[in-house]
Image (cartoon, grey):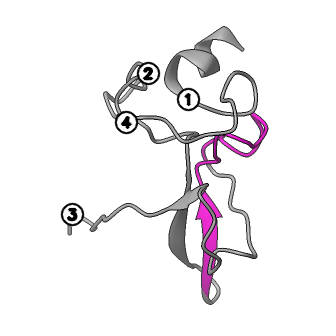
Amino acid sequence: STATQAVAWYSSGGGSITHDVKTKASNALGLYDMSGNVNEWVLYVKDSDERGRCGGAFNTTNTAIQVGYLGSGWVYKNYNYNGFRFGRSAY
C-alpha cells in the first residue's frame, strides 16, 4: 500500500539493495526503519528462548514487514538483508 511504501523498503520498490537509514518517513510512533530494509535478529522469549527475525527486508513481501510477524531460520547466516538493532526494556 502507499502508506507502507512511505515508511518501509520492501519487495514493492525496494530493489535488490539495502538503503540508507532514515530515508523513508517515520512510523506512527515517530520511529524510523522499523519495517523493511533489513531483517532484524531478535531473541523471542515466550514459551522458549528462540532466535528469529522480524521487520522484513528490501526483498520480502509486505506481510513479512508487519508488526507481530516473527520469522525463523537462517538468522545466523551472513546475508545482506539481515541486520540487528540494539534494544533494552525500560523496566
User: Measured along the vertical axis of the image, is residue 26 above or below residue 56?
Assistant: above
What's the amino acid at mark 4?
Val
User: Measured along the vertical axis of the image, is residue 23 above or below residue 11?
Assistant: above
Q: Residue at x 78, y 39 (%)?
A: 63
Residue 74 percent location from the top left of the image: 72, 75
Q: What is the number of the mark on residue 8?
A: 1
- Residue 60 sits inside the magenta stretch: yes
* Quadrant (top left/top right/bottom left/bottom right) for the C terminus: bottom left
Using the image as rendered, state which of residue 77 and residue 72 is in the foreground.
Answer: 77
Using the image as rendered, state which of residue 71 and residue 37 is in the foreground.
Answer: 37
Residue at which label 3 appears = 90
* Disc 3 to disc 1: CB gap under 8 Å: no
Whole-Å distance between the Cαs marked 2 and 1? 7 Å
Label 2 secondary element:
loop
What's the amino acid at mark 2?
Lys
Residue at which label 2 appears = 24
Closer to us: mark 4 or mark 3?
A: 4
Sequence-first tag of 3 and 1: 1
Name the dominant secondary structure of the magenta segment. loop
Whole-Å distance between the Cαs marked 3 and 1? 26 Å
Whole-Å distance between the Cαs marked 3 and 2? 27 Å
Magenta segment: 50-67
Label 1 secondary element:
loop
What's the amino acid at mark 3?
Ala
Residue 1 percent location from the top left of the image: 72, 14
Residue at which label 4 appears = 21
Horizontal placement of 68 versus 27: left or right?
right
What's the amino acid at mark 1?
Ala
